[in-house]
Image: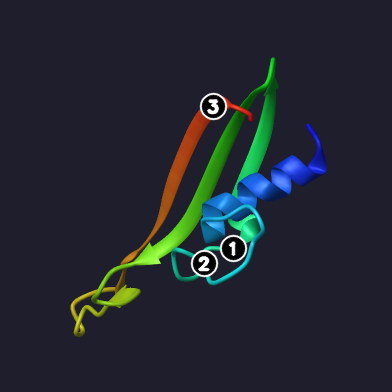
Amino acid sequence: MQPQLITEAQNLVVYGNVSGGGTAIISGLAIGDVQVQDLGDEIIAVSAAHNYSGLLGPILPSFGFGADSSLTHTLMATVTMRAL
């Protein structure tokens, strides 16, 4: 697969366009979070991983009743499709 197509796929996931202009659709999502794998026969797999913490923040304090709990989760998504 051509490196330009990989870059365009990564830009599409992160920015919503193939040129890579603008701000990331999801705050904190970066090109390095997106992997593109050539499965052959013009089929690709696009995977993205992003660390996410909700409205409460990344840590839930225990208020002295044990260890604090992490509220950060890694969200992962993968899609397989024909490359255009």
**Quadrant where the C terminus is found in the figure:** top right
Neighbor class of circle 3 (other Cα within 10 Å; few <14, some 14-19, many 20+) is: few
Q: Image point 57% across, 71% down: which residue?
A: 22
Query: Is tag 3's residue or tag 2's residue first in the polypeptide sequence?
Result: 2
* 79 lies above or below 25: above
Contact, mark 2 vs mark 1 (Cβ under 8 Å): yes
Judged left or right of residue 22, residue 26 is left
Q: Residues within 10 Å of mark 1 (few under 14, many from 20)?
A: some
Q: Are marks 3 and 2 in contact (CB under 8 Å)?
A: no
Query: Do residues under tags 1 and 3 come within 8 Å of each other at their CB atoms?
Result: no
The residue that mark 1 highlights is 30
Residue behind mark 2: 24
Query: Mark 2 Cα within 10 Å, few/some/many (few <14, many 20+)?
Result: some
Task: Residue 9: name its quadrant.
Answer: top right
Res 21 quadrant in image: bottom right
- 3 displayed left or right of 13: right
Three-letter code for the amino acid on which mark 3 is drawn: Met
Which residue in the protein does label 3 denote?
Answer: 81
Residue that lies at the very extreme toward the bottom in this rendered image: 63
Q: Nearer the viewer, mark 1 or mark 3?
A: 3
Instruction: Tell me the amino acid under the disc marked 2.
Output: Ala
Say which label, 2 or 1, has the lower sequence index. 2
